[in-house]
């Protein structure tokens, strides 16, 4: 004699669906939104330790606090500045 728990199966299915929609950021990366058009970039999390990137994070904290309108980290600089900083980090 078995028990039927349809609510649990449905909850697990819903949880799996929700987690499958978040898979677009690979492990070890972080989604960043930059510029007026909020262009999305994926960066390695190792960038978070770099002084030049920490300066960008400080600017983001000053401008947005911890409320980021896109749901991800928003950096208040132009795409050109962001790409210049991240390209220099790629060489390290």
Image: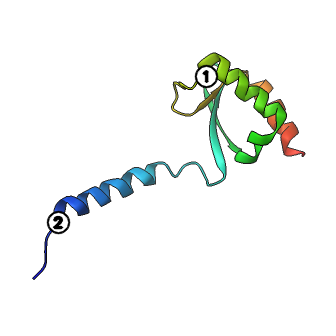
Give the left or right position of residue 86, taking residue 7 as reference: right
* CA distance for labels 1 and 2: 47 Å
- Badge 2 marks a residue whose secondary structure is loop
* Residue 26 vertical placement versus 56 (above, below): below
Q: Residue furthest bottom?
A: 1
Look at 83% across and 34% down and name the residue there: 51
Residue 60 pos. (x, y %)? 67, 23
Q: Which of label 1 and label 2 is nearer to you?
A: 2
Residue at 54% from the left image edge and 49% from the top image edge: 24
35 or 44: nearer the eye?
44
Residue at the image position 70 percent from the left and 46 percent from the top: 45
Q: In the rendering, at what x and y percent does residue 6 appear?
A: 17, 63
Give the image's coloring scheme. rainbow
Point out residue 14 in the picture as x, y percentages from the top left corner. Answer: 31, 54
Q: Quadrant of residue 36?
A: top right
- Image x and y of residue 18, in percent: 39, 50
Residue 66 is left or right of residue 47, and the answer is: left
In the image, taking residue 31 as reference, residue 84 lies left or right, namely right
Could one spot residue 4 in this view of the protein?
yes
Q: Are marks 1 and 2 in contact (CB under 8 Å)?
A: no
The residue that label 2 is drawn on is 5
* Mark 1 / mark 2, whichever is N-terminal: 2
Tell me the tag on residue 37.
1
Q: Residues within 10 Å of mark 2 (few under 14, many from 20)?
A: few
Residue at 64 percent across and 16 percent down: it is 63
């Amino acid at each position: 004699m078995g028990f039927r728990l349809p609510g649990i199966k449905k909850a697990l299915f819903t949880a799996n669906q929700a987690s499958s929609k978040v898979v677009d950021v690979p492990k070890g990366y972080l989604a960043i939104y930059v510029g007026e058009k909020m262009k999305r970039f994926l960066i390695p999390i190792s960038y978070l330790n770099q002084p030049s990137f920490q300066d960008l994070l400080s600017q983001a904290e000053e401008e947005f606090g911890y409320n980021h309108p896109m749901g991800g980290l928003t950096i208040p600089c132009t795409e050109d500045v962001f790409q210049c900083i991240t390209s220099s980090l790629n060489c390290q």
